[in-house]
Each structure stands twice: as C-alpha cells, then as structure tokens.
Image: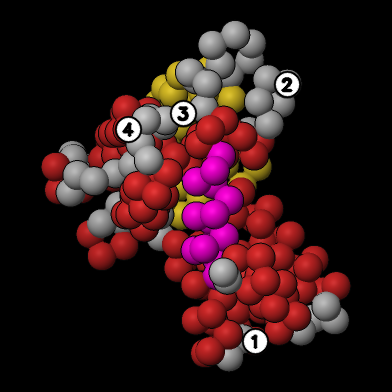
Amino acid sequence: MNLISRRQALSLALGISVAATLPTAAFAADISSESKAFVEHLGRECIGTITNQGIPEAERRAKFRELLLAGFDVPAIGRFVLGRYWRLATDAQKQEFLKLFESMILKTYADRFRDYGGEQFNVVGSRSEGDDHAMVQSRIIRPAGGEPINIEWRVLKPKGTLKIVDVIVEGVSMSSTQQEDYASAIQRGGGDLEPFLVELRQRYGG
C-alpha cells in the first residue's frame, strides 16, 4: 500500500462499518443486496457524523462505542481471534478477554478517526455466500489519487440482524491477522493465557 497503510485503511473501514443505526428490516430481503445497502448506509453515516471533528471527544468516543457494538459482532470476533486458546480458557478468562478486547478496539480505533482526510468510500459490489452470509466489495480512494484500496466486508445475519465479522483489506483478513498476532503473544508467554491477559489488562484495562 503506497498511499495509505493497511492499519489506516482498517481504521477508516472500522469507522464506516460501525455507523449503522437503522433496523435491518428496512433493507432488501436478499442477503447480498441487503448487506450491500447496509454497508453503503454505514459509509454515509460515518463520513457524515463520526469524522466530524467538531464533536467533543467524550461524545465521539461514546458514539463510537455505540455504533461499534451495533455494527460488529464483537464477541464472535473476539472468540475467533483468540483461536484455540478460547477453548482452553476458563469462563472467567473468556469473560475478561472479551471485555478487554472490546476496550482495545475502542481505545485503538477511536483515535484513528483522525486519519480521515477526505477519502472517498465506494461500495462496488456484493455476493451471497449462503442464506445468511454475504461479502461486500468496496474501495477507498484518496483525494490525491493513486491506486484505490480494496476492502471486503464479511457480513452475517445472526438472529435476524446484520453484523460484520471480518474486514479484508487488500486480500488480508484483519481477524486472521489478529489471531496470528495473539497466538504469537501467548506462545511467548509459554502458551499460558494468563500472562497475555495481564498484558492486555495493563494496556486496556484502565
């Protein structure tokens, strides 16, 4: 990526994807077109509101949390990124990890909204992957020009509500990348989950 880093692209993507407030029943019945409309709406809402630098910081963070939880299946993503260690964790460790994982997302990406610099977000297509699963294709275009950044959204519809479970930036799954990062961190602690939780607690528990 020459014009924008993968993490910067993900930051904008996250902002766009958590901006849904309309009930999904308002969209078409077909999962492909429904998911496409969902992501398009997210883009409009995000660029129109979340990137407004006139919003007080505390309000912006509160809004980010609200929209994050509305747009993403955060618990499902958390379980996925912990990988095989989820099965090895105690109930107390699972509960704490999901809380810290949500805090990590909020603290990391709320600040990165400042990276927005007039990029265009265009949804260019979608395809069904099953009755309740679709992939939505989009592009981010920088004002200065150059190659667009291709982003795909994996959208599921658990319990009748659309939720994003992964963001794929230029062919790279952000959930899979994070799973690999977490596995490496846990392995550095001898394969014990507790030292990893201590590190997360120190960084995101305050």
Q: Nearer the viewer, mark 3 or mark 4?
A: 4
Marks 2 and 1 sit apart, C-alpha to C-alpha, by 40 Å
Q: Which residue is mark 4?
A: 49
Q: Which residue is mark 3?
A: 138
In the image, is residue 159 above or below residue 47? below
Of 125 and 193, the residue lying toward us? 193
Q: Earlier in the sequence, mark 3 or mark 2?
A: 2
- What crowding class fits label 2: few (fewer than 14 Cα within 10 Å), some (14-19), or many (20 or more)? few
Name the residue located 45 percent from the left edge and 62 percent from the top edge: 74
Element type at mark 3: strand
Tell me if I can see residue 131 in this picture: no
Residue 88: mark in rendering: 1
What quarter of the picture does the C terminus occupy? Answer: bottom right
Which amino acid, mark 2?
Asn
Marks 4 and 2 sit apart, C-alpha to C-alpha, by 28 Å
Q: Position of residue 83 (x, y in %)?
A: 64, 71
Q: Earlier in the sequence, mark 4 or mark 2?
A: 2
Q: Nearer the viewer, mark 2 or mark 1?
A: 2
